[in-house]
């Protein structure tokens, strides 16, 4: 038995403690933090099952060995572990995947609201003179309907049947059907009794689904679009600020930006710029966090937008409309009397008025706009004529970020956001450039640690070699490249040889999609990505 276990598992030492703030939150109902940690994984060296290298018969033997060992270790707690509410570690070794899903979805959740959205359907075969619960064990299809210890001998897995019996007793069935066994098929849609059962089952399932959806729609609280938009961007910033790593170049830019927040710069906006993937958004997210804390302490207002991440922040008119309405709420304006003009020039004038006249010395404004280059060109979005970058009151701070100028190529429109900002502001002290990262190892280790992972020295050297071999346009010196590499590295086991790492961001993204297609199936990945793209905030 020991030999089988050692052959089926390999020790992975790339698992390390995950920072507490990055562990999933504990829900109001369900397993405790301790239990969630146990069921979701461990933060230490882990033995990994090498299931792809072993035949199924060996795997069944392994399951039996581990189950027997677990029952010996927790023999005195065996009965308590079968309680519907129990989430003892022993269950990992004795219950089925179906029962684990059943536990997570029903038994460990608040029973009252859960009872209304959970329905249990039970189908049994009519008992006959031979077989097991109406199933002829010598039938070739029997193994598809009952757990077998030895299918060739027609031997039922009695332990699995006892567990199934106990699971059925945990929750009363809402509907049940008893049908005759069809030789060689078990369930046959062409059989009259079976056709009736399947029709009734589908009808019941559809009825419950429609009823549940209608009840959910009736309870739906329509969000305030202004608050909803602000919340989306705040959540976006919070997620990235938590992952922010204090590299020298990032801290230099943050230092300049923080000084600007504290002192201002003669009524001018401050601009963070750098090439694609340089980490501007992470810096702007951390800056947002600091500005929000400062605004809360001083009674001021902090408004943020990460342009291009939502529909309302991708087009200039929609952006200005949402900003005006949020500023109106923040500064106590009568929103019912504010009419959003249909003419863009009038809307632009209203936005400038809101920024310059509604704030005050007692209630200052910090406006942070990330990636102004992500606006479309409707209403001169990337000409930035709508942005009041100069002539600001002393109690208003505006910080924006942008890519360098890009020339038109391959039919894709170019833009000159950075040049336009420079020609408007005319003060290089208001500009700070995000430089390339100089210590990739430190950043990769940080990103891996957030996922509870590390990599071996040999694997890290492969990352550093790819970093050093990058070309001028490969973006391998950027946080974006390092983030994608860290995501790839997080799946490496300590015993895996380091694969070839692409030196371009595009190649890494394509590799990610290819890996997903291999693991999940090409058709599924295509359709999922298509649905994500087509959804409201895709």
Image: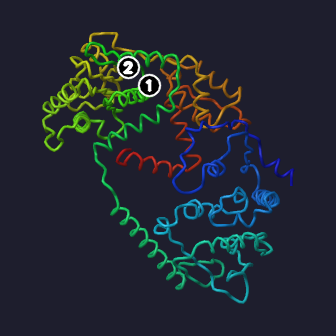
Mark 2 to mark 1 CA distance (whole Å): 9 Å
At x 63%, y 30%, the residue is 500
Q: Evaluate if marks 2 and 1 touch, with contact meaning CB atoms under 8 Å apart.
A: yes
From the viewer's side, name the closer residue of 166 and 156.
Answer: 166
Task: Judge the density around disc 1: few (<14), some (14-19), many (≥20) Cα neighbours within 10 Å.
Answer: many
Q: Which of the 4 quarters of the picture holds residue 295? A: top left
For residue 533, side relative to residue 38 (left or right): left
Looking at marks 2 and 1 on the same chain, the residue that comes earlier in the sequence is marked by: 2
Q: Which of the 4 quarters of the picture holds residue 463? A: top right
Tell me the residue that label 2 is attached to: 272
Where residue 302 sits in the image (x, y, percent)? 33, 30
Q: Secondary structure at mark 1?
A: helix
Which image quarter holds the C terminus? top left
In the image, farthest residue toward the bottom: 129
Q: Secondary structure at mark 2?
A: strand
From the viewer's side, name the closer residue of 315 and 191.
Answer: 315
Answer above or below: position of 179 versus 279: below
Task: Judge the density around disc 2: few (<14), some (14-19), many (≥20) Cα neighbours within 10 Å.
Answer: many
Where residue 365 sits in the image (x, y, percent)? 28, 27
Q: Which label sits on residue 156?
A: none
Q: Which of the 4 quarters of the picture holds residue 77? A: bottom right
At x 30%, y 10%, the residue is 427
Where residue 179 sits in the image (x, y, percent)? 58, 84
For residue 426, side relative to residue 139 (left or right): left
For residue 66, side relative to residue 266 (left or right): right
Answer above or below: position of 31 versus 408: below
Tell me the residue that label 1 is attached to: 283
């Amino acid at each position: 038995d020991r030999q089988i276990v050692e052959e089926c598992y390999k020790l992975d030492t790339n698992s390390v403690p995950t920072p507490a703030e990055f562990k999933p939150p504990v829900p109001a109902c369900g397993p405790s933090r301790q239990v969630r940690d146990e069921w979701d994984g461990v933060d230490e060296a882990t033995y990994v099952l090498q299931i792809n290298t072993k035949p199924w018969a060996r795997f069944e033997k392994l399951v039996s060995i581990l189950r027997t060992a677990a029952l010996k270790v927790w023999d005195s707690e065996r009965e308590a572990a079968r309680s519907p509410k129990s989430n003892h570690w022993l269950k990992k070794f004795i219950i089925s995947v179906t029962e684990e899903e059943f536990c997570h979805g029903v038994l460990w959740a608040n029973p009252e609201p859960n009872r209304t959205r959970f329905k249990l359907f039970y189908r049994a075969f009519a008992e006959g003179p031979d077989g097991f619960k109406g199933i002829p064990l010598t039938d070739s299809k029997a193994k598809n309907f009952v757990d077998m210890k030895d299918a060739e001998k027609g031997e039922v897995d009695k332990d699995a049947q006892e567990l199934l019996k106990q699971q059925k007793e945990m929750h009363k069935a809402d509907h049940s059907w008893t049908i005759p066994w069809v030789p060689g098929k078990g369930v046959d849609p062409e059989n009259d009794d079976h056709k009736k059962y399947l029709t009734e089952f589908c009808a019941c399932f559809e009825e419950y689904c429609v009823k549940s959806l209608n009840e959910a729609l009736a309870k739906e609280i329509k969000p305030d679009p202004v608050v909803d938009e602000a919340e989306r961007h705040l959540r976006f910033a919070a997620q990235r600020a938590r992952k922010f790593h204090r590299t020298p170049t990032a801290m230099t830019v943050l230092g300049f930006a923080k000084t600007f927040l504290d002192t201002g710069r003669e009524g001018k906006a401050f601009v963070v710029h750098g090439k694609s993937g340089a980490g501007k958004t992470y810096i702007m997210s951390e800056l947002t966090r600091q500005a929000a804390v400062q605004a809360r302490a001083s009674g001021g207002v902090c408004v943020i937008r990460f342009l291009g991440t939502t529909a309302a922040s991708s087009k200039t008119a929609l952006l200005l409309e949402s900003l005006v309405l949020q500023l109106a709420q923040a500064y106590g304006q009568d929103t019912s009397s504010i009419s959003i003009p249909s003419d863009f020039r009038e809307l632009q004038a209203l936005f400038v008025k809101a920024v310059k006249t509604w704030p005050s010395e007692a209630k200052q404004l910090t406006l942070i706009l990330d990636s102004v280059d992500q606006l479309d060109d409707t209403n001169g979005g990337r000409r930035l004529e709508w942005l009041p970058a100069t002539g600001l009151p002393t109690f208003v701070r505006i910080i924006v970020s942008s890519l360098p100028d890009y020339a038109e190529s391959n039919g894709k429109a170019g833009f000159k956001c950075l040049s336009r900002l420079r020609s408007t502001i005319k003060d290089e002290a208001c500009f700070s450039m995000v430089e390339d990262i100089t210590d990739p190892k430190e950043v990769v280790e940080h990103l891996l640690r957030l996922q509870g992972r590390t990599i071996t020295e040999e694997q890290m050297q492969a990352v550093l070699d790819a970093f050093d071999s990058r070309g001028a346009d490969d973006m391998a010196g950027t946080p974006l490249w390092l983030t994608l590499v860290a995501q790839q590295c997080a799946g490496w086991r300590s015993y895996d040889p380091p694969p070839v790492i692409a030196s371009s961001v595009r190649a890494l993204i394509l590799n990610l999609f290819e890996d997903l297609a291999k693991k999940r199936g090409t058709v599924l990945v295509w359709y999922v990505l298509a649905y994500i793209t087509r959804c409201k905030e895709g």
